[in-house]
Image (cartoon, helix red, strand yellow):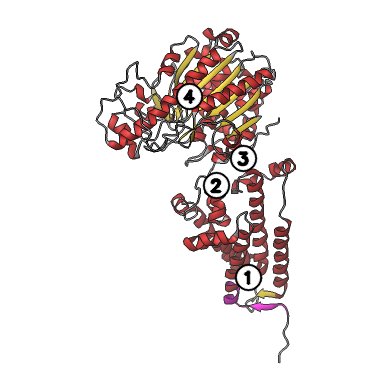
Amino acid sequence: MKKQTFPIRLGAAAVFLLAVLLSGAITLLALWLQPNALRTVLAGFRASPMLIVLNALPVGLTVLTLTFLFRNVFFAAAVTELAVCGLSIANRIKIEVRDEPVFPRDLGLLKEVGSAVGTYDIRFPWAQAGAVVFLCAVLVLLGLFLRCKVEEPYSPRRDWAIRLAGAAGSASVLTALVLTVYASNDLYNSFPASNPYYVPSVFNELGFPYCFTHHFTTYTVDKPAGFDRREAEAWDSADAAPAGQAPRVHVVMVMDEAFSDLTDDPAFTYGEDDDPLPNLHALRQDPNCIAGHIVVPGFAGGTANTEFDVLTGMQTNALSATTTSAFRAVNRDLDSLYRVFDADGYHTSFLHPGDAWFYNRENVYRWLGAEEIEFAADMKDLTYKGRWATDESLAALIEETFETAVQNGETLFNYTTTIQNHMSYTADKYGAGYVFPPVQTSAELSDAAQTLLSVYIEGARDADAMLGRLWRYFAAQDEPVVLAFFGDHLPYLGDDRLAYRELGVALSPQEPGTEAFLRSYETPYVIWANDAAAQALNWNTAPVRCCGDGGRISACYLGSTVLELTGRVQESPWFQYLTDLRRELPVIQKDTVMLSDRSLTSVEALTPDQQALLERLRCWSYYKLKYKDVTE
C-alpha cells in the first residue's frame, strides 16, 4: 500500500464542498456571537428561509475569493472567520455600550474607536473571542495538511492567472450582489422584525452578516466634485471672534412634532373663537417676535433630518445623491449650535420624550456636544394623551430645566424635540372614545380625511397651547430669554396626500421649481425675545429682520439666525458663512433655489459666484463630516 504523504491534495469538488460547509459554520458562529440567543435567530430564519441564504452568501463568496488567492480553502476560511466573527464581536460590544450596531462606515473610524475605548465600561466577551481564535487556529492547522490539487505540469504563470481570475470573478459576483440584492430596501424591509425602527433589534433578528452587508449602500455621504481638504480646512480655521463676548441670554429652541399653520389655508373656516392656533397668531404680532417659515428636508416625515439641519447648518439633502438619514450618517464629533454655546460657557441640554435609540439620538447628541441629554426614561412626571407624552408636560420640563440652570448660576441653551402630534392620525390615537372637535372647512371631506384632520388639528391645538405657555412663562421672567419654536415637517395626511387634495391645498413635493414644491416642505417658525433679552440684544435693530424672504429660509439657516440674533455668529467661521449665504440664497431645496428677491430658479441657472457659494456649502459640510477634529 502506498504510504500517505502530507500535505493531502484535495480535488475541486471536495474544495467546493468544504467551502460551503465552512461558510455555513462561520455564519452560525457569527450569529451565535450576537447579544440575542441563537435559537431565537434560527426560529426567525425558519419563518423566512431566505435569510439563511442572505446571511451565508457574503461569507461564502468571501471564502471562495480567498480560496482562489491562497489555493487553500482552510486558510481562506481562517481569514474569513477572523474578519466576520471579529466584526460580529465588535457589533455585540457596540450594541451593549452604545445601543448601536456596527456599520461598514465604522471601518474608516479606527482612530476614533481606539480613543473611545477608554471612555466606556466594556465587558469583553472573552469566552466567545477565545472560541473564535481557537477555530481560526484549527483551520490554519488543517490548511497545513489539506491543500488544493495543483495541475500538472505546474506552470506558475498559468497558476496565478487561474487564481487571480477566480478571485476576481468571485469578488465581482459579491460586489454585484451588494449593489443589487443587498442594496434593496424593499427586500430588507420585507422581513418581519419586532421593532423595525430599532436598528439593533433588526440586526439581531435578521442576522448580522446580512444587515452589515445591506448597509454598505445606506447612509452614504458623497464626496463633492472638486473637494479639496486643505481648502476646506482653511475655511474652517479662519479668524473668529473670541468666545464669551456676546450678551448672555438664555436660548430655548423647541421643534414641535408636525407643527404647521395648515389651518391658515383658505379652505378652513375657523374664526377667532375656535382658532386652533391663537397663540401663534398672537405671538406673530408681538414687537419682539420674528416670524416666518423654514423649508425643511422632507415632506411628512424626517424629524431627525430637520434636527440635523438646524443644529449643524448642514443640509441632509446635500449629503448624498440617494435618500439618507442624516443622523445615521453621523458617527463622530461635529460642530453644532451646542458647541458654540458651550464655548460661551452655557449649560447645554437636549430633551425628547421618546426612546433614546430612535434615530440613534443617544449617540448623535453626544457627538453634537450636548452636555445634558434626557429621554422619556429619564423624565419624571410626564403626562400622556393616549400613548403619547404631552406637549404640556414637556413645557413644564423645559421650565424646570430653565429654573435649575438659573438656580445654579448658569445660562441655558436648550433644544427640545416633542412627540405628541406624531402620526398616525387615527381615531383611537388618544384612546377609545376620545371626542375630537369637528374640522371647520368649506371643503367636502371624505370620512378618512375628516378623521385625519380632526386628530391632527387636536394635536396642533396642544402644540399651540405649549407655545402660549412658554411665551407667557418667559415673558414673566427677569432673566433674558430667547425662544425659538418651529415645526419639523408637515403632517402625513393619507396616501397620495389625501386630505391635502380634498382641501385643495396645492402641494407638489416631487415637482421642483414651483411654489407648490416649496410649500410641501414649509413649516412655521417664531423667534421671540422677552423684554430683558430684547433690551440686552438691541432686538429692534436686528439685521436678520430684513434679510431674505421676510422670513422664508432653509432649515439649515435657522441655527445661524439664532446665533446672529444673540450676537455670537462671528464666533464660528462656519455659521458666519451660513449667515452670508442666507442673504444671497435664502432657500436651497434640492435643485430649487430661492434668491433674495424671492424669485425661484435652479442650481444650474445660478451665477458662477452663487454656484461657488453653494459648492462651498457642500465641500465644507463634507470636510466636517469626514475630517474635522472637534476638540472639546
In percent of the image, x 57 and y 64: which residue is there? 60
Q: Is residue 15 magenta?
A: yes
Which residue is at the front of the view, 462 or 561? Answer: 462
Q: Which residues are magenta?
A: 6-16
Q: CA distance from mark 4 to mark 1?
A: 67 Å
Tell me if label 2 and label 4 are in contact, CB under 8 Å. no
Q: CA distance from mark 2 to mark 4?
A: 28 Å
Q: Answer few, some or many: residues within 10 Å of disc 1's Cα (few below 14, many 20 plus, some between 14 and 19).
A: few
Q: Is residue 563 left or right of residue 428?
A: right
Q: Say which amino acid is labelled 3.
A: Asn
Q: Is residue 468 left or right of residue 115?
A: left
Mark 3 highlights which residue? 331
Of the two numbered discs 2 and 3 in the rendering, the one whose residue sits closer to the viewer: 2
Mark 2 highlights which residue? 199
Quarter of the C terminus within the rendering: top right
| Sequence order check, earlier mark of 2 and 3 | 2
Position of 78 relative to 151 (above/below): above
Q: CA distance from mark 2 to mark 1?
A: 45 Å
Mark 4 highlights which residue? 486
Percent x, y for residue 20?
Answer: 57, 69
- Label at residue 159: 1
Position of 55 relative to 274 (above/below): below
Which residue is at the front of the view, 402 or 16? Answer: 402
| Sequence order check, earlier mark of 4 and 1 | 1
Q: Secondary structure at mark 1?
A: helix
Residue lying at the far bottom in this picture: please name it.
1
| Sequence order check, earlier mark of 2 and 1 | 1
Q: Answer few, some or many: residues within 10 Å of disc 3's Cα (few below 14, many 20 plus, some between 14 and 19).
A: some
